[in-house]
Amino acid sequence: MVESRGSIAFFTTYRPTVPLDIFSCPSIPSSPPRQDDDDLLLTDGVSYNQNGRPIPAAALAELLAFLGKNNPKLAAECRATPDDAVSGRVTGLVFVSERDNGLETLHVALRFPACAKPGVRVLSLADVYGPDTFGGVRMEDSGCVAGGFDDVGHSLVYVSTKEPAKRRRTPWTVVYRTNLADGKTERLTPPVLDAGLSPRDHDRFHTHSIETLSTLARRGPVYTKLLLYEIFIFALSYHFLEV
């Protein structure tokens, strides 16, 4: 008996693998301008890089301190210490890059502006905090740093798809935070929500929290869904508050 099979026809577009880079330059250009220009390339000149956000000096110091304990060999190669971050001899940027297997994942660029010839060293977060937290097939985005007040340390807050999807044809991005001082990671998006996206630091009224957009899926006809978006504010040392 001959098995009869159907076929699927589809159309798709794709982004060509062209470089999209991130640069830095002084807010006040040198005078007279240097011959090699003030622009400093923070990425690799090959892959697609986007969504860069600066890392505060105190937060970068916590990251470098953990790197020295968790990966001392890499820390020695970077030649950057927590004191360097506090003094401004090294600055940091967290950004999304496709340099690792074409996946959109978070990286940290260390910039050394005080050197005779300013340089950059890019680190994978897996090299700093380990592959258990930042490993495997996943996509990450919207990295930002929050915390750093009272008894709450700094945390990297980001979106990731490292958890499997619960249902077909539903978003499964989840907001997490990773403590920069000890590497502990926890999920911020409540389990009742289908997805979390676009976190940002929220420091009104001298308190630090995370504002994030989440979705609640309401089932409609077979192939359609109505997504209702709600905004949640997460106090980093307490439970989340809905607004």
Image (tube, rainbow, N blue to C red):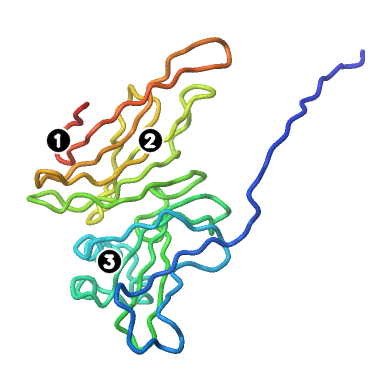
The CA span between labels 1 and 2 is: 18 Å
Horizontal and vertical percent position of residue 109? 39, 66
Depth check: 54 or 157 in front? 54
Say which residue appears at 15% left-offset and 53% top-offset: 148
Say which residue appears at 33% left-offset and 79% top-offset: 29
User: What residue is pinned by disc 3?
Assistant: 64
Other-residue count near label 1 (Cα within 10 Å), few / some / many at <14 / 14–19 / ≥20 = few
The answer to whether residue 221 is above or below residue 174 is: above
Please tell me whether mark 3 or mark 2 is closer to you in this view: 2
Horizontal and vertical percent position of residue 138? 49, 43
Say which residue appears at 23% left-offset and 74% top-offset: 88
The CA span between labels 3 and 1 is: 27 Å
Q: Secondary structure at mark 2?
A: strand
Q: Quadrant of the C terminus?
A: top left
The answer to whether residue 36 is above or below residue 204 is: below
Depth check: 130 or 209 in front? 209
In the image, what residue type sits under mark 2? Answer: Val
Horizontal and vertical percent position of residue 144? 31, 51
In the image, what residue type sits under mark 1? Answer: Tyr
Q: Quadrant of the N terminus?
A: top right
User: What residue is pinned by disc 1?
Assistant: 238
Say which residue appears at 27% left-offset and 47% top-offset: 184
Residue 174: assigned label: 2
